């Protein structure tokens, strides 16, 4: 990014705080409810359990979290007063291989967290962001970076993403796949 921007510096964005209860959890459940009720076996067991656990939130917790989310969305642009955009890893963890995901689904660990990555921040803030490829892990799994900004900064975000893609070739590369790559099967409901 250094050759593409005027300045690079370490910055922090506000934590989600009480709003973390809503995004991604409650909203994820609300979005998936009809689908997961109708065809739960189309979800990997770990994801299905995480989504269904979100149905247990009481109204008071949801409303308080919604108030925190509204406050955060009204004030997020102030965090960008000394910089235009942020660039951060798209995911907090490296992507697992499909075989590892299938193994984790077959032998779930209670309380094993699911990472929604850093994209959840911009979803919660209600601000624009884009993810672009920026490399591969040592295991050959793709890695992305997210570029995000305050409200109405789509033009700057897209311009930086395009400049990054013009400066690199990560967006042209593909992970190695083979006919032996395992295919997920529909799970029985449990």
Image (tube, rainbow, N blue to C red):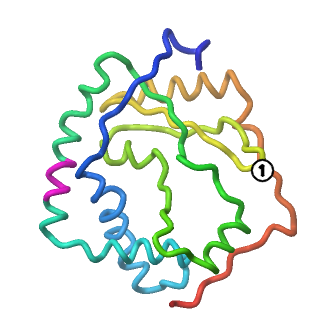
Q: What percent of the width, then of the height, locates residue 96? A: 67, 58
Residue 107 appears left or right of 5: right
Q: Residue at x 78, y 72 (%)?
A: 182
Residue at image point 26% right, 29% down: 77
In the rendered view of the protein, which quadrant contains the N terminus?
top right
Q: Quadrant of residue 11?
A: top left
Left or right: where 81 falls relative to 190:
left
- Determine the residue located farthest toward the top in the rendered image: 6
> Looking at the image, which is closer to me, 138 or 47?
138
Q: Residue at image x 25%, y 51%?
A: 19
Residue 16 in the image: state x and y as whole percent. 30, 45
Percent x, y of residue 187: 60, 85
Magenta stretch, main secondary structure, is helix
- Element type where label 1 sits in the image: loop
| Badge 1: residue crowd in 10 Å (few <14, some 14–19, many ≥20) | few
**Residue closer to the observer: 124 or 112:** 112
Q: Position of residue 97 (x, y in %)?
A: 71, 60
In-image side of 15 versus 112 (left or right)? left
Is 68 inside the magenta-drawn segment?
Answer: yes
Identify the image quadrant of residue 101.
bottom right
Residue range highlighted in magenta: 64-69
Q: How many marks?
A: 1
The residue singled out by tag 1 in the image is: 139
Q: Is residue 103 above or below residue 165?
A: below
């Amino acid at each position: 990014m250094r050759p593409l921007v005027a300045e690079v510096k370490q910055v922090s964005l506000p934590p989600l705080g009480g709003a973390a209860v809503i995004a991604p959890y409650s909203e994820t459940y609300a979005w998936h409810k009809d689908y997961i009720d109708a065809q739960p076996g189309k979800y990997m067991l770990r994801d299905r359990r995480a989504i269904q656990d979100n149905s247990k939130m009481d109204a008071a917790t949801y409303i308080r979290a919604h108030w925190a989310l509204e406050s955060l969305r009204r004030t997020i642009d102030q965090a960008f007063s000394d910089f235009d955009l942020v660039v951060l890893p798209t995911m907090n963890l490296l992507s697992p291989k499909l075989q590892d995901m299938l193994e984790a689904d077959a032998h779930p660990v209670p309380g094993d967290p699911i990472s929604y990555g850093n994209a959840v921040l911009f979803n919660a803030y209600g601000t624009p962001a884009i993810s672009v490829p920026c490399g591969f892990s040592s295991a050959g799994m793709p890695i992305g970076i997210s570029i995000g900004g305050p409200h109405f900064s789509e033009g700057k975000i897209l311009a930086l993403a395009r400049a990054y893609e013009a400066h690199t070739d990560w967006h042209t590369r593909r992970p190695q796949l083979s006919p032996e790559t395992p295919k997920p099967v529909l799970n029985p409901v449990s």
